[in-house]
Image (cartoon, grey):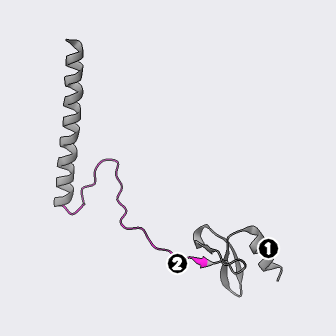
Amino acid sequence: MLARFILLMVLFVVIAKMFWRFIDAVVSGATGGAAQSRGARKSGPPVSVKMQPCPICGTYVVPGKAISAVSGGASVYFDTEKCRAEFQSR
């Protein structure tokens, strides 16, 4: 008897959660996504970044995560410290 009660409560919780997600999706769709669901952060499409080639080995790197140096007033991006050291020794 107790097991049946527990199973019915679990079923009720699952159905209630599914119903809430359905209502949340309908409201979000009707408002153009303005109503965000709890815990979800929609930041829009990913921002594209132009990758730069390493002048020593030619590997393309993301400027924000690369090792950099300034040469002639412009930033130059490297994939490793070894490439930067070789570039600076020239």
Task: Using residue 88 as the reference point, say whether residue 74 is left or right of it.
Answer: left
Residue 51's x, y, as percent? 56, 76
* Displayed quadrant of residue 73: bottom right
Residue 69's x, y, as percent? 71, 76
Q: Disc 2 designates what residue?
A: 50
Residue with the most extreme right position: 89
Considering the numbered disc 1 on the image, is that residue within a helix, a strand or a loop?
helix
Task: Give the amino acid at mark 1.
Answer: Ala
Residue 43 falls inside the magenta stretch: yes
Of the 4 image quadrants, the one containing the N terminus is top left
Residue 20's x, y, as percent? 20, 43
In the depicted view, which residue is nearer to us: 52 or 68? 52
Tell me which residue sits at (80%, 76%) in the image. 86
Q: Disc 1 designates what residue?
A: 85
Task: Give the amino acid at mark 2.
Answer: Lys
Of the 4 image quadrants, the one containing the C terminus is bottom right
Between the C-alphas of marks 1 and 2, the distance is 24 Å
Considering the numbered disc 2 on the image, is that residue within a helix, a strand or a loop?
loop
Task: Using residue 49 as the reference point, say whether residue 70 is left or right of it.
Answer: right
In the depicted view, which residue is nearer to us: 57 or 80? 57
- Which residues are the magenta region? 31-52
Tell me which residue sits at (60%, 67%) in the image. 65
Q: Is residue 32 above or below residue 8?
A: below
Q: Is residue 10 above or below residue 1?
A: below
Is the residue under label 2 in contact with that under label 1 (CB below 8 Å)? no
Tell me which residue sits at (58%, 69%) in the image. 64
Task: Using residue 86 as the reference point, say whether residue 77 is left or right of it.
Answer: left
Tell me which residue sits at (79%, 73%) in the image. 85
Residue with the most extreme top position: 1
In the depicted view, which residue is nearer to us: 7 or 64? 7
Q: Residues within 10 Å of mark 2 (few under 14, many from 20)?
A: few
